[in-house]
Image (cartoon, grey):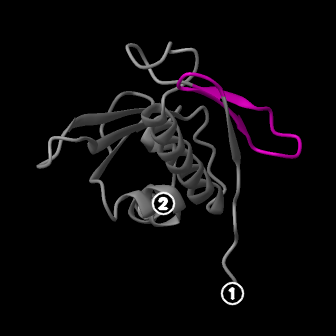
């Protein structure tokens, strides 16, 4: 199977602010560094990375649930990236933690053990990021019980 190519274009607006053009019918997005470099007028690159990982994990969990005709909605995901200095004293994303929450109690979902065992493998972004950044994934049900 041939590899797919995804392209976007970034155009500097001013200082560290960039218009991100996704093409076609996808609205543009303004990205900006937080102060003191930028003005915080849009998500930072680290926030965009968190959004990509969180969205991909959420979609993968939903995909896995729907394979079994399950309805876990509404799903939510909170994700945090730890930013710190590496051995060369450069800022890096040192690790990420994602907390996915189902909108229903676990007891209402058949095959949940299978879903939880496999959904991360479907996440293109997280599995790619994990090659260089540790990503911890936790899953909770609608009652707050930790499932994974």
Q: Position of residue 33 (x, y in %)?
A: 47, 24
Instruction: Write down the quadrant of residue 32 in the picture.
Output: top right
Location of residue 36 with respect to 47 vertically, above or below: above
Q: Position of residue 73 (x, y in %)?
A: 61, 36
Q: CA distance from mark 2 to mark 1?
A: 22 Å
The single residue placed furthest to the bottom in the displayed view is 1
The single residue placed furthest to the left in the displayed view is 87
Location of residue 142 with respect to 56 vertically, above or below: above
Q: Secondary structure at mark 2?
A: helix
Stretch of the chain drawn in magenta: 13-31
Left or right: 87 as drawn, with respect to 69? left
Please state which of the two labelled residues, at mark 2 or mark 1, is closer to the viewer: 1
Q: Position of residue 144 (x, y in %)?
A: 35, 28
Q: Which residue is mark 2?
A: 119
Q: Are marks 2 and 1 in contact (CB under 8 Å)?
A: no
Instruction: Kindly tell me whether residue 93 is visible in this rendering.
Output: yes
- At 44% from the left and 63% from the top, the residue drawn is 128
The single residue placed furthest to the right in the displayed view is 25
Q: Position of residue 116 (x, y in %)?
A: 41, 57
Instruction: Kindly tell me whether residue 123 is visible in this rendering.
Output: no
Based on the picture, tell me whether residue 28 belongs to the magenta stretch.
yes
Left or right: 25 as drawn, with respect to 3? right
> Which numbered disc, 2 or 1, marks the residue that appears first in the sequence?
1
Tag count: 2
- At 56% from the left and 42% from the top, the residue drawn is 55
**Relative depth, front residue between 107 and 115:** 115
Instruction: Write down the quadrant of residue 71 in the picture.
Output: top right
Q: Which residue is mark 1?
A: 1
Mark identifier at residue 59: none
**Relative depth, front residue between 67 and 106:** 67
**Relative depth, front residue between 71 and 44:** 44
């Amino acid at each position: 199977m041939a590899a797919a190519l995804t392209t976007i274009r970034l155009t500097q607006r001013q200082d560290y602010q960039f218009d991100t053009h996704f093409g076609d019918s996808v609205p543009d997005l303004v990205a900006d560094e937080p102060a003191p470099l930028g003005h915080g007028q849009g998500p930072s690159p680290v926030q965009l990375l968190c959004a990509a990982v969180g969205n991909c994990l959420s979609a993968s969990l939903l995909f896995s649930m729907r394979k079994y005709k399950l309805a876990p909605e509404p799903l939510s995901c909170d994700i945090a990236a730890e930013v710190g200095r590496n051995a060369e004293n450069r800022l890096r994303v040192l690790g990420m933690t994602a907390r996915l929450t189902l909108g229903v109690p676990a007891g209402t979902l058949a095959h949940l053990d299978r879903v939880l065992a496999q959904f991360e493998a479907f996440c293109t972004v997280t599995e790619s990021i994990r090659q260089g950044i540790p990503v911890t994934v936790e899953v909770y049900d609608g009652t707050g019980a930790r499932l994974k």
